[in-house]
């Protein structure tokens, strides 16, 4: 991993929907042009990806956080922290949500 960052899941984001996309993983794929098929969490190889809302545990957080390709299992762990490669995070802003 070239550029590790510690993240954790944001809570209460289930109702947030992306503009122009049917899911957050579709949004993430469009932004990154990635065909990634496994979870971004270091050491996890699950393939049931979702676009997870995450925050940076250390440093200055983004206003609305990031979308990362996590598996359903890692996405459901709200109290855990994870290591991912920073290049897999897509910053999201107010313009990316359906209001």
Image: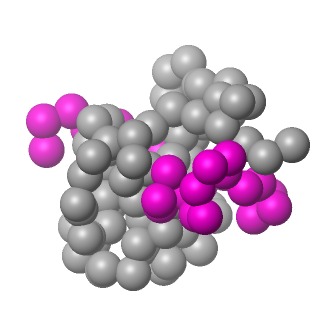
Seen at 60% across and 64% down, the residue is 22
| 94 w.r.t. 40: above or below | above
| Residue 30 horizontal/vertical position (percent) | 39, 48
Q: Nearer the viewer, residue 62 or 24?
A: 24
Does the magenta-highlighted stretch encompass residue 9? yes
15 within the magenta span: yes
Place of residue 54 in the rendered image (x, y in percent of width and height, measured from the top left):
56, 48
Q: Nearer the viewer, residue 69 or 45?
A: 69
Q: Quadrant of the N terminus?
A: top left
Q: Position of residue 29 (x, y in %)?
A: 37, 53
- The number of numbered discs placed on residues in the rendered structure image is 0
**Extent of the magenta region:** 1-27
Q: Residue at x 56, y 18 (%)?
A: 60
Q: Is residue 81 visible?
A: no
Q: Residue furthest front?
A: 20
Q: Main secondary structure of the magenta part?
A: loop
Residue displayed at 41% across by 72% down = 49
Using residue 54 as the reference point, say whether residue 39 is left or right of it: left
Residue at the left extreme?
Answer: 2
Left/right of residue 17 with respect to residue 9 in the rendered view: right
Residue 58 appears in the picture as rendered: yes
- Coloring basis for residues: one colour
């Amino acid at each position: 991993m070239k550029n590790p960052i510690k993240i954790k899941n944001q809570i209460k984001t289930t109702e947030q929907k992306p503009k122009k996309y049917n899911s957050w993983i579709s949004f993430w794929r469009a932004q990154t042009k990635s065909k990634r098929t496994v979870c971004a969490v270091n050491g996890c190889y699950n393939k049931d990806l979702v676009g997870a809302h995450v925050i940076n545990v250390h440093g200055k957080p983004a206003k609305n956080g990031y979308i990362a390709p996590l598996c359903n299992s890692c996405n459901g762990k709200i109290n855990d922290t994870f290591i991912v490669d920073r290049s897999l995070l897509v910053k999201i802003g107010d313009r990316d949500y359906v209001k």
